[in-house]
Amino acid sequence: MGNAIYLKLTYCTKCKRNVEMINIRYNKLANNRLAIEGYCITCSCKLLKTKVMPKSGVKRRKLTKVLKRKGIRIRIG
């Protein structure tokens, strides 16, 4: 997985379609949930994707390791 960011596609309300995000970064919200912030590739509108963490399995463990390396602490559960 490396430094790749998980789930780069999200729905843009301005373009009315699923688009890829640019300038992506992980962000922890006030309720301790993980979100991905970025910008729409076509209209440069700010996008936020909140359903980031996989329910279980290998992808969740890999993503948790990447986030710990980046210094982002999250509540799991």
Image: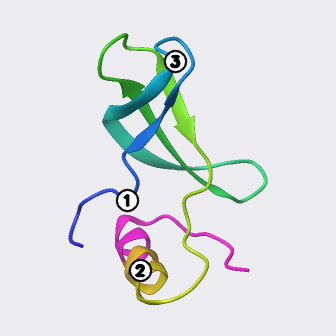
Up the image or down, 32 lies above or below 21; here it is below
Instruction: Report the number of numbered marks.
Output: 3
Cα distance in 3D space between marks 3 and 2: 29 Å
Residue 31 appears left or right of 26? right
Q: Which residue is labeled 1 in the image?
A: 6
8 lies above or below 47: below
The residue sitting at 56% across, 69% down in the picture is: 73
Q: How far is mark 1 from mark 2, CA to CA?
A: 9 Å
Report the coloring of the rendering.
rainbow
The amino acid on which the numbered mark 2 sits, given as a three-letter code, is: Lys
Evaluate if marks 1 and 2 touch, with contact meaning CB atoms under 8 Å apart.
yes
Residue placed under numbered mark 2 in the picture:
59
**Horizontal side of residue 24 vs 46, given as left or right:** left
Q: Earlier in the sequence, mark 3 or mark 2?
A: 3
Say few, some or many: other residues with alpha carbon within 10 Å of mark 1 (under 14 / 14 to 19 / 20 or more): some
Q: Residue at 56% of width from left, 67% of height from top?
A: 53
